[in-house]
Amino acid sequence: MIQRAQTAAPPASDAVHGIRPFSVLRTDLGPWRTRRRSWEELGLHSRRGREHVSTYSTGSDPVSRKHATIGGGLSTFDPVLAELSYRWYCPDGGSILDPFAGGSVRGLVAANNGHPYTGIDLSPSQIDANEETAAAWRDRDLLAAEPRWILGDSAEQLPRLPGGSFDYVFTCPPYHSLERYSDHPADLSAMRWGEFEQAYREIIAETVRCLAPNRFTTWVVGEVRGSTGMLRGLVPLTIAAHETAGARLYNDAVLLNTLGTVPMRLGAQWRASRKIGRHHQYVLTFVKGDARKATAALTS
Ligand SMILES: C[S@@+](CC[C@H](N)C(=O)[O-])C[C@H]1O[C@@H](n2cnc3c(N)ncnc32)[C@H](O)[C@@H]1O
């Protein structure tokens, strides 16, 4: 909304705030950082409501294996990635569904850009915090549409939503047990891998059902290791589950994160296990129906 007015010259049609849709998305470069600062200055508190979350790394060395209460390694969603994804893949004013809402970022960015947003999350404290932040944004006239959060298990809540009623699905699911959100039996981060896989497939199938025909859906996922150190294959699982549900993989981008503490941790990890220092995630975009028609809905 107000941020769009700051663009000085009309951008090339594919660029948003100087960022173009290449297959590697560079969060470390100037245009991305400048835009992220603009969002932060508006007051995005993506960690609010996430005090209960703990991180768990399945690395084999003692340091990376320990449970840590959040403060340090907690993931927070990048508002620029949300904004770009909405601008690139969601029709103007189109509705957005997010089955693993987490913090308020995706909802606030959607509503600021005029998209009605529906997020589902199991955590009552997270939803309370999100609504509090949204109320403050509403008071400051920063919302051009309404964000709403539904408390509950997506496997139960999604089947209650009408089929074909959303224009875009955009989410960042639990990366299995990398972060632990709660002990709730429906919490995907608390499940054993086999249960996780089944629940994850069901939720993906439901989001595809909720999506209108000829529309895109984007999942931001990272790989995780199991207890034997092998990669779980969350990325191929996400692709296979969408294909089974009737949405085909259309774009695969790599989100390059800043290095942060990765260089400090890498030495011991590499010497002990030859595990590389991960600082990327995947941005997987699928299409339900015809990609040309989905594209036409964005430009008409
Ligand atoms: C990866 S987090 C989202 C974090 C994201 N990086 C952010 O800050 O927006 C995933 C969310 O999924 C929620 N969750 C886990 N299992 C769920 C389920 N079965 N239904 C709905 N939400 C669930 C957790 O409470 C957590 O907030």
Image (cartoon, grey):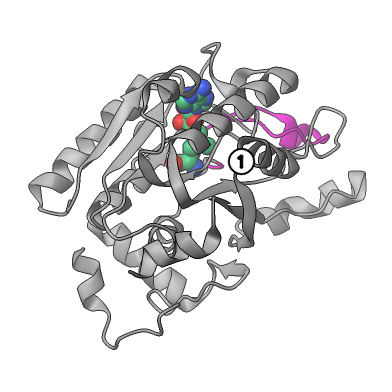
Say which quadrant the C terminus sits in. Answer: bottom left
* Vertical relation: 292 (above or below) 43: below
Q: Is residue 57 visible?
A: yes
Q: Is residue 262 left or right of residue 285?
A: right
- Name the residue at 32% across, 26% down: 150
Give the amino acid type for the residue marked by disc 1 in the picture.
Gly
Q: Main secondary structure of the magenta part?
A: loop
- Left/right placement of residue 238 relative to residue 185 reads right
Q: Nearer the viewer, residue 284 or 125?
A: 284
Residue closest to the far bottom: 9
Q: Is residue 159 above or below residue 9?
A: above
Residue 254 spot, x, y in % from top left:
64, 61
Mark 1 crowd level (few <14, some 14–19, many ≥20, 10 Å Cα): some
The span picked out in magenta is 54-73
Residue 290 lies in quadrant: bottom right
Q: Give the quarter of the figure containing the N terminus.
A: bottom left
Above or below for 8 versus 237: below
Identity of the residue furthest to the top in this view: 185
Q: Is mark 1 within 8 Å of ligand 1?
A: no
Residue 263: x %, y % from top left: 71, 59
Please tell me which residue lies in front, 258 or 281.
Answer: 281
- Dot 1 corresponds to which residue? 246
Q: Residue at x 72, y 53 (%)?
A: 278
- Give the side of residue 274 with respect to residue 158, left or right: right
Q: Can residue 181 be seen at all in this image of the molecule?
A: no
Mark 1 secondary-structure assignment = loop
Residue 95 falls inside the magenta stretch: no
- In the displayed structure image, the side of residue 257 where residue 82 appears, left or right: left
